[in-house]
Amino acid sequence: MKAPLYLRPRSLQEALEALGEPGARPLAGGTDLVLLMRDRLVRPSLLVDISCLEELRRVERDADGLRIGAACRLVDLEAHPLVPPVLRSACRQVGTPQVRNVATVGGNVCNASPAGDTIPPLLSLDAVAEVRSAAGSRSVPLDRFFLGPKKTVLAPGELVVEFRIPGAALGRGGCFQKIGRRSEVVIAQVNAAATVELDERGALAAVRVALGSVAPTPLRCRLAEEKLTGRPPAGEAVEEAARAVLESISPISDVRAPASYRLRVAAVLTRRALAGALREVGVKDL
Amino acid sequence: MSGAGDRVWLNMVVNGRPVQVSVRPDARLIDVLRDDLGLTGTKEGCSRGECGACTVLLDGEAVNSCLVLALKAEGREVLTIEGLARDGQLHPLQEAFLRHGAVQCGYCTPGMILAAKALLDRHPHPTREEIRRGLSGNLCRCTGYKKIVDAVEEVARGGVRP
């Protein structure tokens, strides 16, 4: 295989122009891309190394909410005070310390594995991907970003530059759950994230439930959310939501787990994620 | 920028010395360290970033050299296991590993020691749990890990900045 060219652009503009070349791919940490290249699953003719672009590595609050640069490394996000705990927790559980020192949140999202750990938390936070190309820009809510396993809506030449989390989502309680064959290094058999917000009467004003590894893409389980919205957060309601999740998902059997296991565990992780999120907003006993 | 399929120059500092190597753009750091620079202390275990045998320090941070493209090291500092001992004197971590019997086949050892160094550089006095977490990216098939943790803990307790 002919070795691809490698470019380290000095600006986002230069990166976007280079990405306009046919066969060009963005390289962030490379922890997924290098393996895809070695397995010959992708054959880029040009690697555009965006990992050093400062404008893609910021975490900033603004009037609308939080902006997380797509090239932020997982190690930097896992301890960042501005990043919501539900996402910090997921970042901490990707791979190993060595992987987290290199891998980026943008890479984890755009690799679009159904098991990507940062994705359910971002979905539960109503994240929007800001996409740029040499031709312009667009915003894609993350629940419309994934088309299938390893497939996103990104067209050639497009680059996710940051994720925006709306201010309304930042105040919610949240919790991330992941289960695998061991405690580190695993690709999730199932993962889940939930965020909740209570109104003045103590009822659930906002609920988000997102699961990964149980469908062709990570997804929001709206049926489960509907079961809870507007209701007081009692154990029974959470139970109903956990069961409702089963109607939104379609897990497969693969090397990591059989579908039957995933079905059972999806409900368990949903319950735990909701309980954890509710604990954050003061609801201790369900 | 490089010509298609051509080699490119890579300039980096390895174990304190500036080096310049001609590399394929898709070469991994481990390929350059072992094959071009002859630093075979870094081992290739799984080739997928899961075992940590290939761990080196890049600007002081532990990374899997089997996953990092060599060109990403341009202008940066790399520390391999060969760079730990100074003037024939073993590093405290190396001595502790020997003292505690934390080396059996030795294959995981270079990566394990470098991961431990990166941990102690950041957290000079970790708990056993923190040590295990810091080394969670490094697999060992021989020792059962206890002696490795003992060795790292001894260096940490000694307060010797590694």
Image (tube, coloured by chain):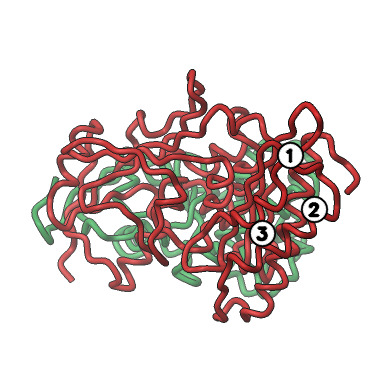
Chain colours: A red, B green
Point out the tag, 1 or 3, that comes first from the N-terminus. 3
Q: In the structure shown, which secondary structural element does the residue marked by tag 1 occupy?
A: strand
CA separation in Å, label 1 and label 2 = 11 Å
Residue holding disc 3: A178
Q: Judge left or right: residue B137 versus residue A278.
A: left
Structural crowding at the residue carrying mark 3, measured as other residues with C-alpha within 10 Å and reported as few (<14), some (14–19) or many (≥20): many
Q: In the structure shown, which secondary structural element does the residue marked by tag 2 occupy?
A: helix
Quadrant in which the N terminus of chain A appears = bottom left
Above or below, comparing residue A284 to residue B66 in the picture: above
Answer yes or no: is residue B94 visible.
Answer: no
Residue holding disc 1: A204
Q: Judge left or right: residue A25 versus residue B143.
A: left
Residue holding disc 2: A237
Q: Residue furthest top?
A: A63
Q: Position of residue B91 (x, y in %)?
A: 62, 47
Tag in front: 2 or 3 = 2
CA separation in Å, label 2 and label 3 = 22 Å
Nearer to us in this view, A280 or B18: A280
Tag in front: 1 or 3 = 1
Image quadrant assignment for residue B136: bottom right
Asked whether the beta carbons under mark 1 and mark 2 sit within 8 Å of each other, the answer is yes
Chain of the residue displaying label 2: A
Asked whether the beta carbons under mark 1 and mark 3 sit within 8 Å of each other, the answer is no
Above or below, comparing residue A178 to residue B44 in the picture: above
Q: Are marks 1 and 3 on the same chain?
A: yes
Q: Residue at x 74, y 50 (%)?
A: A274
